[in-house]
Amino acid sequence: MTHKVYLSLGANIGDRHAGIAAALELLGETVGRVVRRSSIIETEPWGFESENKFLNMCVALETDLSPHQLLVATQDIERRLGRKAKSAGGVYADRLIDIDILLYDDISVSTPELTVPHPHMRERDFVMRPLMEIMDGNW
């Protein structure tokens, strides 16, 4: 069964454009078909201080993966691109790549590892602006 998924991608260190491009390529290879992608926007860090601005975007994908399989796949992509660890305990830091699951079909997931819809997406303009860009219309 094919599922509709929306992801947020961000990077604020290293070659930010190359990191996002590599993440998009790996998502297409390992997760599913990218059917829409937003513009890339540059934003200030959210939740921590840094001199490094973020590049952010959202993508819509079709996938056969379950929510937890999708989480494992996106975390594997982050590791493959050099990310050492996810932010823990609400402490954020600079990152080569960050991939967050925003929406998965119309379902809600609430486990210690994964919460969908993403619990903070509505607070984050850098998520909502690109997400709204790709959500209008059907796919």
Image: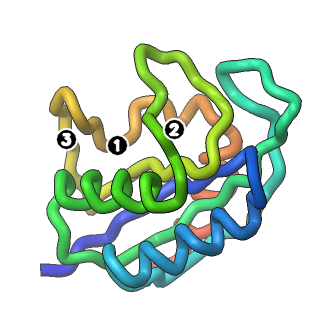
Answer few, some or many: residues within 10 Å of disc 2's Cα (few below 14, many 20 plus, some between 14 and 19): some
Q: Position of residue 66 (x, y in %)?
A: 15, 62
Q: Position of residue 31 (x, y in %)?
A: 32, 74
Disc 3 target residue: 109
Left or right: residue 83 compared with residue 128: left
Left or right: residue 16 compared with residue 138: right
Marks 3 & 2, CB-CB < 8 Å contact: no
Q: Residue furthest left?
A: 1
Marks 3 & 1, CB-CB < 8 Å contact: no
Q: What residue do we see at 48% from left, 28% from top?
A: 87
Q: Is residue 65 above or below residue 119?
A: below
Q: What residue do we see at 42% from left, 14% from top?
A: 89
Marks 3 and 1, Cα distance to the nearest angstrom? 7 Å
- The foreground one among 34 and 17 is 17
Left or right: residue 65 compared with residue 11: left
Q: What residue do we see at 44% from left, 61% from top?
A: 80
Disc 1 target residue: 117
Closer to the chain start, of discs 3 and 2, is 3
Marks 3 and 2, Cα distance to the nearest angstrom? 15 Å
Left or right: residue 14 compared with residue 121: right
Q: Quadrant of the C terminus?
A: bottom left
Q: Quadrant of the N terminus?
A: bottom left
Instruction: Report helix, strand or loop for mark 3.
Output: strand
Which three-letter amino acid code belongs to the residue tagged 2? Answer: Met
Disc 2 target residue: 121
